Image: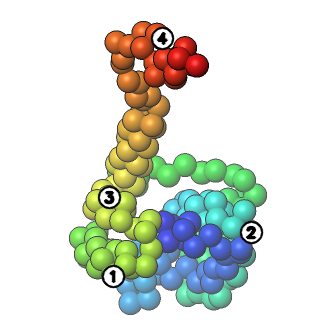
Amino acid sequence: MPIAQEFSPDVVLVSSGFDAAEGNPDPLGGYKVSAKCFGFLTRQLMTLAGGRLVLALEGGHDLTAICDASEACVGSLLGLQEPLPDDVVMQKPNANAVRSLQTIIQIQSQYWQSLKASSGSVSLSYLCAQRRDCEETDAVKALASLSVGVLSNKTLSDEPMEDDSESM
């Protein structure tokens, strides 16, 4: 998402095969992504391109998985929000996924500035990463709201401009 946000596309096209959905055998996907998670991912993509999002069903192997995931995605497009279960938002990512993401960030951060802030949150659960982002944003806002004033012991008569005007 950081790259997609920085790129700022005009439209998002998604080829939806749902091979990663729960119900597909391991050789095809094996990721066991829930239908609710596909709906959540759709909502995330809807924040891009002013919500201009095209989901194209490109096939699949498990009819039940395709139906459930498609229904969740269409529900998200219609504005229905199915919250993810607590155990899902608190689940840490797979170690192999973390290593892959760290490699991707290392390479792609040369081209995408937004990835530099993401490198520290790759191994965190979704909820912990969101909390961290909020805390960092709050800290930046707090620092930005501070005004720096210079205290001075000078009185108005000590101002050089006033001295110049009196001498004229």
In percent of the image, x 34 and y 12: which residue is there? Answer: 153
Q: Sequence-wise, which precedes: disc 1 or disc 4?
A: 1
In percent of the image, x 60 and y 51: which residue is there? Answer: 82
- Proximity of marks 1 and 4: CB atoms separated by less than 8 Å: no
Expressed as whole percent of the image width and height from the top left, the position of residue 72 reads: 64, 63
Expressed as whole percent of the image width and height from the top left, the position of residue 166 reads: 55, 14
Q: Which mark is residue 156?
A: 4
- Residue denoted by label 2: 52
Label 3 packing within 10 angstroms: few (<14), some (14-19), many (20+) = some
As measured in the structure, the alpha-carbon distance from the residue carrying label 2 to the one carrying label 3 is: 28 Å
Expressed as whole percent of the image width and height from the top left, the position of residue 81 reads: 64, 50
Q: Amino acid at mark 1?
A: Ile
In percent of the image, x 71 and y 74: which residue is there? Answer: 10
Q: Amino acid at mark 4?
A: Leu
Quadrant for residue 64, please give it. bottom right
> Relative to 66, does residue 135 appear above or below in the rendering?
above
State which mark lies toward you, 3 or 4.
Answer: 4
> Relative to 131, does residue 122 appear above or below in the rendering?
below
- Residue denoted by label 3: 121
- Residue denoted by label 1: 107
As measured in the structure, the alpha-carbon distance from the residue carrying label 1 to the one carrying label 3 is: 17 Å
